[in-house]
Amino acid sequence: PATTQRNQPVTVTVTGAGGQIGYALLFRAAAGAMFGSHTPVRLRLLEIPAGVRAAHGVALELDDCAFPLLASVDVFDEADRAFDGTDVAVLVGARPRTAGMERKDLLAANAGIFGPQGRAINDNAGDDVRIVVVGNPANTNALIASAHAPDIPVDRFTALTRLDHNRALAQLSHRFGVDTGHITRMAIWGNHSNTQFPDVSNVAVKGSPLAGSQLDRAWLRDEFIPKVADRGAEIIAVRGASSAASAANAIIDHVHDWFKGTPAGDWTSAAVMSRGEYGTPAGVFCSFPVTASGGAWHIVPDLKMSDEARSRLAISTDELLAERAAVAELGLLPVHHV
Ligand code: NAD
Ligand code: LMR
């Protein structure tokens, strides 16, 4: 945990480091955004051979920033070496979807990456390693990676849904005319896909729960939920490429909170291994409202959920089960996980 490591360098391995998210992420990580201004960072960049030159280019630019906290940058095309001694593994490397593709189209293309990387993390990473999976389909890729890392507690694996959480905060900020910093207790449930359930039922604005007309059901159903759930596709359509800087920002927030803790009175969202909480199926990586303390995530307990909320969550967890079955069918999960 961060408190004992504050002045020790933290080793961060980023896969897909030559890609879009890598380019938006690495400079902020090197500037201290993940662990604060007293913690040096060692960066290890993993790419496939076709991406190694781009990653070397990023390393040259990192050098040219003369970041005081950047202890080292190394580029690898071999996972065992890239994860050697790593404290934080950010698994970005995967093909992004392009216009017209749904996330499930990425299953076969990307899932094969995460078994070997899980094994390499298992065999080479530091004892305290923490892993965040970003490459899509992120929840199921986290399952595959953790299934190939039997020596690493499954709680060290997460999939990123912080971008969805931040997207929801931004929409609420526009709707209610307050800064995002005044909005607490937003929750993203389920899969990082358009079946996710962005849940405002516990949201407070400046400490007061939403009430009455603020909880306009038609707006929630017809505007807010689809806006958040389909934002990835909207970005692809408008920008012509999948979200990168906002994804990198969400990775920074996720890792920062994992090490430093979430603020008192608030929570965030992350996909963690379900043990059946809130009626979800055990054994899939599901997004929950979570707090972080002591270097660990904790699912927020005892929230009331309406029947509608439960059925929305069930749609998303059914999709997670279907993704798990699909990758099992492809032989990408060890037999005892199927
Ligand atoms: P990109 O194509 O710009 O970069 C991906 C990089 O990964 C490429 O440089 C590629 O060479 C590399 N790569 C591919 N296979 C690899 C492997 N086995 N090991 C190491 N590197 C490998 O894509 P991007 O825009 O950076 O997006 C990366 C992934 O992140 C995509 O799957 C995208 O859908 C996903 N994504 C997730 C979220 C989220 O919130 N969870 C948000 C945005 C994007
Ligand atoms: C996003 O949410 O922006 C990413 O997961 C990219 C995508 O395919 O939606």
Image: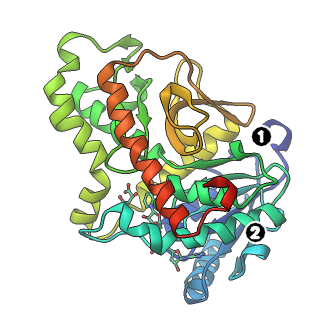
- For label 2, the SS is helix
Label number found at residue 2: 1
Residue 120, labelled with which disc?
2
Apparent side of residue 132 relative to residue 224 in the rendered image (left or right): right
Report the amino acid beneath label 2: Ala
Residue 209 bears which disc, if any?
none
Asked whether residue 155 is in view, the answer is yes
Picture quadrant of residue 147 = bottom right
- Please state which of residues 264 and 217 is positioned toward the viewer in this rendering: 217
Residue 213's quadrant in the figure?
A: top left
Q: Is residue 248 visible?
A: no
With respect to residue 296, does 183 lie above or below?
above
How many residues crowd mark 2 within 10 Å: few (<14), some (14–19), many (20+)?
A: many
What secondary structure is found at the residue carrying circle 1?
A: helix
Viewer-nearest residue: 135 or 273: 273
Q: Is residue 38 above or below residue 75?
A: above
Circle 1: residue type: Ala
Residue at 60% from the left image edge and 47% from the top image edge: 158
Q: Residue at x 76, y 46 (%)?
A: 153
Spatial CA distance of label 2 from label 1 is 24 Å
Q: Could you tell whether 73 is left or right of 101 in the image? A: right
